[in-house]
Image (tube, grey):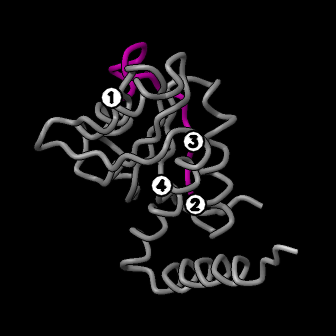
Amino acid sequence: MAPTGKPLVNIMMGSKSDWEVMKNASDTLAQFGVAHECRVLSAHRTPKETAEYVSGAEDRGVEVVIAAAGGAAHLAGVCAAHTVLPVLGVPMESKLLGLDSLLSTAQMPGGIPVGTLAVGKAGAVNAALLAIAILGLKDPELRKKIKQYRADQADKILKEKLT
């Protein structure tokens, strides 16, 4: 069941084809009960709409933006240019195995930060977890949930048997 209420996180992707990966971010947020919204908006094909959407995010109650794009299409950087909210960039796999996406996201000029995560699914999941950690700074219940998540991960590893 999807969380209800005003979205606290916006998940944006430059193309519908990114949904297969970014669904992992949405699923992770839903697992923690974090209301969020997912949109396809392009830094280059819909620049006006992207700027308007991101510029209005804070007024809509959004606290974190997750932006994913492939190639050198730098959706996260465009988002960061239009808001002071934390922007988490997820590079998508591309013809250059995501290296171009990673570099375009990580190499932001000083003054406009973008938190850059790993390429692909791991980055999508970690972007959601980082968004939850950010939200947890002022939401004790979310902070408790992320601590339990981490403890569960540790327990799972400690229970591993090699033979």
Q: Which of marks 1 and 2 is in front?
A: 1
Q: What stretch is highlighted in magenta?
A: 35-50
Q: Which mark is residue 38?
A: 3
- Residue located beneath label 4 in the image: 9
Whether the residues at callouts 2 and 4 have beta carbons within 8 Å, the answer is yes
Q: Residue furthest front?
A: 163
| Residue type at the position of mark 1 | Ser
| Relative horizontal placement of residue 53, taking residue 19 as reference (left or right) | left
Residue drawn at x 71%, y 58% is 2
Whether the residues at callouts 1 and 4 have beta carbons within 8 Å, the answer is no
- Residue located beneath label 2 in the image: 35
Residue drawn at x 63%, y 70% is 32
| Residue type at the position of mark 4 | Val
Of the numbered discs 1 and 2, the one sitting upstream in the chain is 2
Residue drawn at x 44%, y 39% is 67
Pointer 1 local density, CA inside 10 Å: few below 14, some 14–19, many at least 20: many
Q: Which corner quadrant holds the C terminus?
A: bottom right
| Relative horizontal placement of residue 51, taking residue 131 as reference (left or right) | left
